[in-house]
Amino acid sequence: MRHDPLAPSETPLGFLEAWEQLIGGLGTPMLAPRRGRKPRVPLGDLLSGLTFHVLQGAGTLSEHFEQLFGAPFADSSWSDRRTRLPWAIFAELMRRALRPRATKRQPEAFWRGWRLVALDGTQFNLTNTAQMTAIKKAQTRRGSAAFAKLTTTVLLELGLHNPLAAAIGRRGQSEWELGQGLLAQLPRGALLLADRLYGCAAFAIPARTICARVGSHFLLRARGRVKPDVVKRLRDGSRLIRVRLRVPGQPRDDGPLLEVREIRVRVGRPGHRPSELRLWTTLMDLRTAPAVELAQLYARRWEHELYYRQLKRDLRRTDVLQSHTVDTAAQEVAAMLLASALLATERSRAAAGHTPVLRVSFSKLLGLVRPLWLMLGVFGDLVTDRQKQQMVRRTYTLMGRCVTAPRRSRTVPRAVRQPVMRWARVLEPHSVAGPLQFAVI
């Protein structure tokens, strides 16, 4: 496949240039002035060094910091500085760095002009240290879980796997609580996709208010137990419904009222039992938002799960976070999210508008970015700027050729081998092939 490299002005020369482009004009946050000796290592170098560390494979934080800046910094000094850093620094850093990046050159990131955004959460395993007391282990039917979990919720730009905002449960907050807090950071002109956790009036009512404020919309999968009142049946088979939010301590009819469009779709493959999908949306125009297209679009939400798999299996490849306290573990997760934003930008540059961004292999791109940035950081003073540009452009050309085949649709049912709550149980593994069929009911 022919791949035209980018212009020299579009390609950063190393990690630090890419970091500066990620942060933008606001720069890194600043600590409040304090008395005493000035720190030997500036805060900006600490933040960029930590992000560079999570991008690497084997090695310690001090080793990677020396590779990046050529200055030694002991692991004990790192531990002391990270322990004293307030979380507000990382929250502000993510607010400045995480922002929409898809352009019209990436049509896969849009649907009918709406920027596709997904909301979902995941959990990271924490080490079993005495300092991990702020978050309790979950109880299972076999006793306490092996590890405490750090819940993280991300607002993700689909089509690029670019994080737009994130919330990390440093005090044991649930995904539901973190997800509600991220609504305020929904970008303009977006279509928000979310799963059944958010498919209720308690989330949809504030989401509708925020969407109306910024000119966005949502498409949620509704919970099966919600029983709405049907106001009107529309021409395409969808319904205009009303759902009232029940407020504890108030009469049933005094709660806020939600009015949305509900789409009920039967999804399945020929010769196999179909399943029913209930969707709520604020897109009311039947011509610009057909019911079947919205049902097919909702399947794009699964990209969020693939994004989390890339974070855990490709970027870090560790079963547990390396940090020994809850706050430093949250810092590590924040650095991973910043690193994923960097890689989303590099992936977009490698695609160069010739192929969908997500078709560029994440693992292969990471395998090319790591040695390039290491070489430019350690040996950059041994080559000229022209040679650096040639190496960078050639690397981007190689990245653009690492194109994977189109992803197949899901063929394995969502089930488990051991019974957990209401999940279907797997007795004999099997796979179902064939195109999905959607029918509005």
Image (spheres, rainbow, N blue to C red):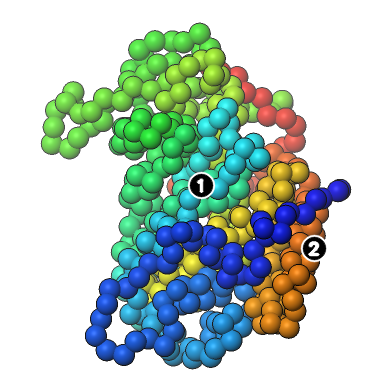
**Secondary structure at numbered mark 1:** loop
Give the camera-side residue of 313 and 45: 45
Which amino acid, mark 2? Arg
- Mark 1 or mark 2, whichever is nearer to me: 2
Q: Can residue 325 be seen in this snapshot?
A: yes
Q: Position of residue 435 (x, y in %)?
A: 72, 30
Residue that appears at 49% across and 67% down: 335
Q: Which mark is residue 269?
A: none
Residue that appears at 49% across and 22% down: 263
Which amino acid, mark 1? Pro
Distance, label 1 to label 2, CA atoms, is: 27 Å
Residue that appears at 31% across and 36% down: 206
In the visual, does 157 lie left or right of 1?
A: left
The correct choice, above or below, for 316 with respect to 228 in the image is: below
Give the camera-side residue of 267 and 66: 66
In the visual, does 76 lie left or right of 314?
A: left
**Secondary structure at numbered mark 2:** helix
Residue for badge 2: 394
Q: Residues within 10 Å of mark 1 (few under 14, many from 20)?
A: some
Q: Position of residue 226 (x, y in %)?
A: 36, 29
Q: Which mark is residue 100?
A: 1
The correct choice, above or below, for 196 with respect to 385 in the image is: above
